[in-house]
Image (tube, rainbow, N blue to C red):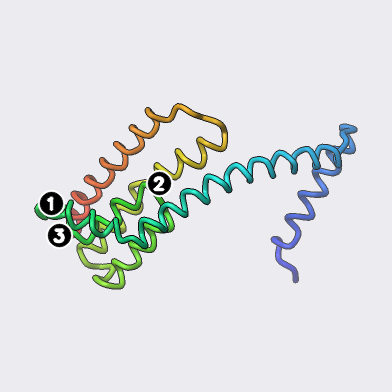
Amino acid sequence: MAALGEYILPIIILLITATAFVKRLPAIDLFIEGATEAIKCMSMLFIRLLALVFSVKLLLNAHIFHVLSDKIAMIGKGAIPAELWPLILLRPVSGAASLAVTEEIYQLYGPDTAVGLMASVIQGSTDTTLYIVTVYFGAIGIKRTKEALSIGLAADFIGIITAVLVAKWFFF
């Protein structure tokens, strides 16, 4: 017996075709117009995404995040564990890179340790603000992003501080 999932796409195509036929719309012309717009949008997104990925990879390979995190951890005097600073610095920039750092934290310290639990809460309570502003805002043509960036980074900061405090309060 075939799964329902095998029939979903053909049903959607059939419904779209039937709707176009009933409304007497040029389905092929509309499809080509939509596909052309999608390709334009993808090309704009791809260029921005490529620039962001290249920048993150360059910073990671140059170990700038690790050097920055060591310096910040010394200034912070242990308020936030030093092991979390690479995650804190990468999280607003790249979701994939921050997941890789979280995985590294799990491998080195374990997921049930203080650092592992704090990393988990940070992953869940913050977002990739710079990625959103760069890729999504750029794709729809928003040029003035200062306020959105400020608010997004402030929300990330609050999320990180709250994540550390909540993790310390609940788990330790």
Give the residue at mark 1.
Answer: 79
- Residue 111 image position (x, y, % from top left): 28, 68
Ranked by sequence position, the earlier of labels 1 and 3 is 1
Q: In terms of depth relative to the viewer, which is nearer, 73 or 25? A: 73
Q: Looking at numbered disc 3 in the image, what kind of residue is underneath it? A: Phe
User: What crowding class fits label 1: few (fewer than 14 Cα within 10 Å), some (14-19), or many (20 or more)?
Assistant: few
Mark identifier at residue 172: 3
Q: Earlier in the sequence, mark 2 or mark 3?
A: 2
Three-letter code, disc 1: Ala
Mark number, residue 128: 2
Percent x, y of residue 90: 34, 53
Residue drawn at the location 55% of the way across and 31% of the way down: 141
Task: For mark 1, give the secondary structure.
Answer: loop
Of the 4 image quadrants, the one containing the C terminus is bottom left
Spatial distance from mark 1 to mark 3, Cα to Cα? 15 Å
Q: What secondary structure is found at the residue carrying circle 3?
A: loop
On screen, residue 108 versus residue 35, left or right, reads: left
Quarter of the image where one finds residue 4: bottom right
Q: Give the class, few, some or many, for how many residues have Cα within 10 Å of label 3's Cα (few <14, many ≥20).
A: few
